Image: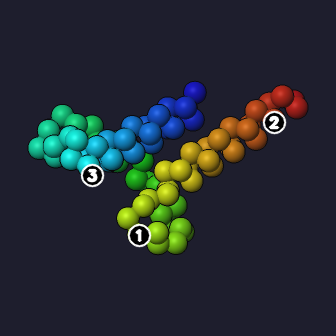
Amino acid sequence: MLVNVFVMLIIVQFVIGLLFAFNVINASNEFVVSIYRSINTLLEPILGPIRRMMPATGSIDFSPLVLIILLNIILIVLRGIISAA
């Protein structure tokens, strides 16, 4: 369940970031900005090291995708360990 919460937070962060980038949501909307900042505060300790290890890709940040893939791999491995026991 914890993995699903992290994946949902990553997706929400990505969507809000896109909405800011395309000016769908104005950056002066304090409610959305506070949600975006709090999600960034939660995810930055995890996404930061992934960003440092990945090559520069310009303005596209692939670290959330890498984190989702890593979390799913961990989930698959844990399910395999639990079912084998």
Task: For the C terminus, give its image quadrant.
Answer: top right
Q: Residues within 10 Å of mark 1 (few under 14, many from 20)?
A: few
Which residue lies at the image location 18% right of the left edge and 34% below the top edge?
Answer: 31
Dots 2 and 3: beta carbons under 8 Å? Answer: no
Which residue lies at the image location 38% right of the left edge and 64% below the top edge?
Answer: 59
Which residue lies at the image location 52% right of the left edge and 72% below the top edge?
Answer: 55
CA–CA distance in space, label 1 to label 3: 15 Å
Res 34 seen here: no
- Residue corresponding to mark 2: 81
CA–CA distance in space, label 2 to label 3: 42 Å
Secondary structure under the numbered disc 2 in the rendered image: helix
Question: In the image, is 5 to the left or to the right of 1?
Answer: left
Q: Image quarter for residue 73?
A: top right
Q: Residues within 10 Å of mark 3 (few under 14, many from 20)?
A: few
Which residue lies at the image location 11% right of the left edge and 44% below the top edge?
Answer: 28
Colour basis: rainbow
Q: Position of residue 66 (x, y in %)?
A: 57, 53
Residue type for callout 3: Ala
Task: For the N terminus, give its image quadrant.
Answer: top right
Q: Position of residue 83 (x, y in %)?
A: 84, 28
Res 84 seen here: yes
* Closest to the observer, 46 or 4: 4
- Residue corresponding to mark 1: 58
Secondary structure under the numbered disc 3 in the rendered image: helix
Residue type for callout 1: Gly
- Looking at the image, tell me whether mark 2 or mark 1 is earlier in sequence order: 1
- Residue corresponding to mark 3: 21
Q: Position of residue 5 (x, y in %)?
A: 49, 32
Residue type for callout 2: Ile
